[in-house]
């Protein structure tokens, strides 16, 4: 009897061991509808197999989660996966002991991983000079232009032909204001949209060394005559009540979705929120450009974030991470995510699957982000990869806010962005020599 009980006890122990799942913690910065999407991705992956369990944990805004992860790494309890926004890429690349390149994680786990399957502008941004992919492209976005078609109709504007150039945006804004609209145009993520994406879209450098992609030594040059002209034009629109500044990061999104603002330059990743919550007909189009600038429009730069694998974990945990990334890479999962959120499908297979499903025809403008990113990319338009860029973005916000408030000229603010930003770049280069 005792022997039988012992056998049963041992069997129970082995059964429990066999059923034990490897836990994978994923820190992210997604909110609202995008947080629901992240939770659903983990839930569906967990239901698709029994060996691993991914647990998403919201850790605050992008800059907050990055700071928290650095502290956690030093304390020895970092997450397995960390979502980092694109401006943190150079900093993560420099943190060699804290991360494991995603290419190595996939290779060690025996998973098929072909960087050439990804949209080139996406894969290239997260790839080291030696060709190794460092992080997994996740919620990749780019700047697009949204309009409230109902507001356009009320102002007597053509809803079938959206403004394509900055002069056309200004004219539309004037008509919207005349029709009683108090916020004709606004922007989210002003540094990203009005300096970074603006530069690439006009095939103009934001910084030397191919915007930092060539390696260290890059310095900001975002005070060129073209940059000054653009910020001056926006400042004039602000004075006339045609451009209303609504705050940093994605603060302006709420003003657009509520109907308060009629036009906005924002992330393609805002599409999920806008399409779900806006009570008006939504229009999506390409970012405006200046038609007299040679080579414009070119292509916009990547935004959003990627997933970085933290070091110091067990082999079985890395295998789980690789399995999760393999799941995320499937064309079906990618296509569904793209349709739901407005983020890029990241692989060409997912883009083609979405196209063949008829989604773009049924939802005009939803292919804008992909089309902007798959144009011919030049050295000036591949992306921005600069050290200390989280802090540089703050400088951009501070200085541009002075312009919108009428306290500084466009030239003064841009000169200050370059001077203060280059001091941070020099500091980064010194700290990461060798």
Image: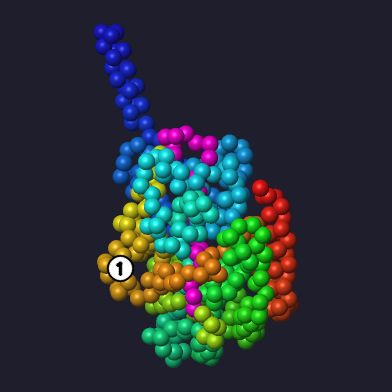
- The residue sitting at 46% across, 44% down in the picture is 104
Examine the structure image and report whether residue 324 is included in the region drawn in magenta: no
Residue sitting nearer the eye, 326 or 48:
326
Left-right relation of 352 to 121: left
| Residue under pointer 1 | 355
Instruction: Answer yes or no: is residue 26 visible.
Output: no
Coloured how? rainbow
- Residue 70 screen position, x and y as percent: 60, 45
Label tally: 1
Tell me where residue 98 sits by quadrant.
Answer: top right
Q: Secondary structure at mark 1?
A: helix
Image height of 15 relative to 433, above or below: above
Residue at x 45%, y 71% (from the top left corner): 376
Stretch in magenta = 296-318
Q: Position of residue 58 (x, y in %)?
A: 50, 50
Residue 148 location, x and y as percent? 44, 79
Crowding near pointer 1: few (<14 within 10 Å), some, many (20+)? Answer: some
Residue 300 is one of the magenta-drawn residues: yes
């Amino acid at each position: 009897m005792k022997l039988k009980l012992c056998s049963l006890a041992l069997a129970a122990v082995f059964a429990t061991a066999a059923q034990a799942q490897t836990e994978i913690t994923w820190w992210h910065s997604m909110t609202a509808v995008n947080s629901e999407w992240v939770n659903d991705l983990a839930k569906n992956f967990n239901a698709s197999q029994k060996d691993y369990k991914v647990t998403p944990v919201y850790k605050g805004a992008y800059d907050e989660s990055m700071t928290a992860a650095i502290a956690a790494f030093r304390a020895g309890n970092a997450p397995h996966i960390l979502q980092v926004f694109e401006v943190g890429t150079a900093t993560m690349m420099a943190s060699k002991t804290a991360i494991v390149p995603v290419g190595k994680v996939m290779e060690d786990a025996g998973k098929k991983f072909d960087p050439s399957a990804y949209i080139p502008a996406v894969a290239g941004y997260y790839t080291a000079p030696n060709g190794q992919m460092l992080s997994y492209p996740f919620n990749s976005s780019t700047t697009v232009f949204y309009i409230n078609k109902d507001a356009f109709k009320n102002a007597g504007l053509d809803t079938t032909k959206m403004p394509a150039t900055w002069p056309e945006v200004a004219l539309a804004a004037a008509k919207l204001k005349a029709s009683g609209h108090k916020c004709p145009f606004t922007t989210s993520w002003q540094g990203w949209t009005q300096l970074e994406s603006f530069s690439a879209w006009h095939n103009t450098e934001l910084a030397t060394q191919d915007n930092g992609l060539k390696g260290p030594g890059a310095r900001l040059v975002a005070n060129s005559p073209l940059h000054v002209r653009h910020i001056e034009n926006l400042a004039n629109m602000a004075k006339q009540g045609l451009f209303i500044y609504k705050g940093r990061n994605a603060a302006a999104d709420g003003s657009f979705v509520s109907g308060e603002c009629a036009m906005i330059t924002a992330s393609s990743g805002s599409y999920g929120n806008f399409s779900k919550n806006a009570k008006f007909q939504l229009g999506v189009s390409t970012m405006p450009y200046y038609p007299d600038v040679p080579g414009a429009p070119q292509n916009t730069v990547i935004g959003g974030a990627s997933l970085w694998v933290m070091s110091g974990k067990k082999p079985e945990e890395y295998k789980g991470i690789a399995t999760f990334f393999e799941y995320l890479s499937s064309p079906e999962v990618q296509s569904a995510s793209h349709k739901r959120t407005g983020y890029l499908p990241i692989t060409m297979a997912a883009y083609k699957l979405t196209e063949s499903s008829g989604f773009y025809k049924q939802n005009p403008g939803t292919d804008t982000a992909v089309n902007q990113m798959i144009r011919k990319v030049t050295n000036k338009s591949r992306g921005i990869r600069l050290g200390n860029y989280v802090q540089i973005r703050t400088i951009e916000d501070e200085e541009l806010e002075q312009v919108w408030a009428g306290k500084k000229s466009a030239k003064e603010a841009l000169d200050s962005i370059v001077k203060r930003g280059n001091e941070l770049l020099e500091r980064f280069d010194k700290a990461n020599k060798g």
